[in-house]
Image: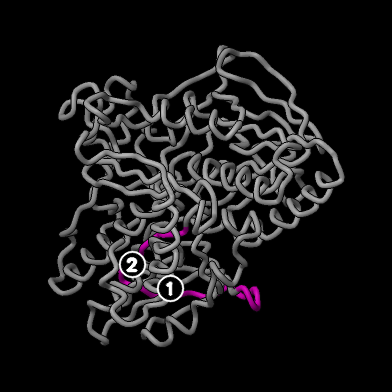
Amino acid sequence: MKIVIIGAGISGHTAALVLRQKLSKEHDVIVVSPNKMWNWIPSNIWVGVGQMSSSDVTFEIAPIYKKQGIIFHQAKCTEIYPEGLNQSKPFIKVQSTSSDQFYDIECDYIVNATGPKLNFAATPGLGPHGGHTQSVCTVEHAVKTSAALDILVEEMKRGHNKTLVVGTGHGMCTCEGAAFEYIFNLEFELRRRGVRDKARIIFLTNEAELGDFGVGGLNLEMGGFITPSKTLAESLFVERGVDWILGAHVHKIDEKTLEYETLDGERSTLSYDFAMLLPPFTGVPLKVFDQSGVDVSTQIFNAGGFMKVDADYTVKTYENWLPEDWPKTYQTRFKNMFAIGIAFAPPHQISKPMKSKNGTVIAPAPPRTGMPSAIMGRTVAQSIVDMVNTDSKQPTYQSSMADLGAACVASAGFSMLNGSAVSMTMYPIVPDFKKYPGVGRSLTHTTGEIGLSGHWIKKLLHYAFIYKAKALPFWWIIPE
């Protein structure tokens, strides 16, 4: 059997390592990715403030795969034929990144783990490529962001006041947590460099409330009281002197100003000197064909380009959303094809959908990165192992985000002596208001606190997960 994984991010890389570990050598595990470097993306925020270098968060993946016995193609997948074509075996069509030539790769199982396409084009002027804002979405972006920050700090040291804006560059962005981490590392860095008094820092977000994070916020039991994450987040922003603008959709960005609309329908202009704004995501462009050569892409992908799996995609009002809507096995309508991580299409948001008075959608897309992505990768890999060994078409493992918990450590300042991080856990990721009335999640297993120990944990996790990703001895002991 040949199992091909399209993408080598957190979910795809995890799936590849687990498959190779658990399948006998008679079966081929194949990874296709246009990138030759593996990037631990959660630490890009530290690269973006100059506290880590690109070499601290990346490594070359080909040697790792060669050592593990995984076949690697540095190429971009363009077409998928999960049933084959005219009685042929299933295959994917790829384009080599070195020669631009197209060729086919035969396979029996396909795992779409392509991750997101960074859709900077959704907002005119957004992004580091032809736009006016910085990013930490890739390590290359983060290095450029750090260099821009250095220039800004030098101007501040000469006595110039500056306005810095961090957040989301579109009303339908996800990963507000990355913007949250970056803004507090930025604020900490400005204090460390002695120019904090010259900076006005503004958090511009599509969240209706601080602490929403695209998961509808958290409720925490503290001292016998239930405290919303909104309260904890606001206290941190006030303590660090960071202003905020909520429920914002950015319409356009010029070199020194950006225009945005808020949920109340008001349009405003904000002048800035430095901006790090995250883009919305779409799926990586792919086409899927049936065995007759008919393009069935519109049946397989949603409007955003994410692959439909075993979720309930019936259009429902927020009040009718159910935990059962979320996928469990990540199998598509083609029994030999799966989609994991950001590549799969969620049935709906997690946060309550919101529109401005003008009808503009301003609502966080559901996060599907980090720990959940890795768990999906392991789950699908284990199912494929059983399917290969039993010649079954039925996945044997499940990991619905409605049944999964997650842990997150959000950095709020890089220092082993006086840094800090917000340590959070939640269970489940998708709230269940029937099981947990009023709060949606277990108050026992949903927690949050900030402190220096959180920074130590964040730093330890950085090294642990890179160790695991390099498949070093006993890598499988480290949990997702």
Front: mark 1 or 2: 2
Ranked by sequence position, the earlier of labels 1 and 2 is 2
Question: Image quadrant for the C terminus?
Answer: bottom left
Q: Is residue 111 magenta?
A: yes
In the displayed structure, 205 sits above or below 52; it is above
The reply to whether residue 433 is visible in this rendering is: yes
In the displayed structure, 344 sits above or below 159; it is below
> Tag 1: residue type?
Val
Residue density around tag 2, few if under 14, some if 14–19, many if 20 or more, within 10 Å: many
Mark 2, residue position = 15
Residue density around tag 1, few if under 14, some if 14–19, many if 20 or more, within 10 Å: many
Mark 2, secondary structure of its residue: helix
- Say if mark 1 contacts mark 2, CB within 8 Å: no
Which residue appears farthest toward the right when viewing the image? 158
In the displayed structure, 243 sits above or below 297; it is above
Residue at the image position 22 percent from the left and 31 percent from the top = 432
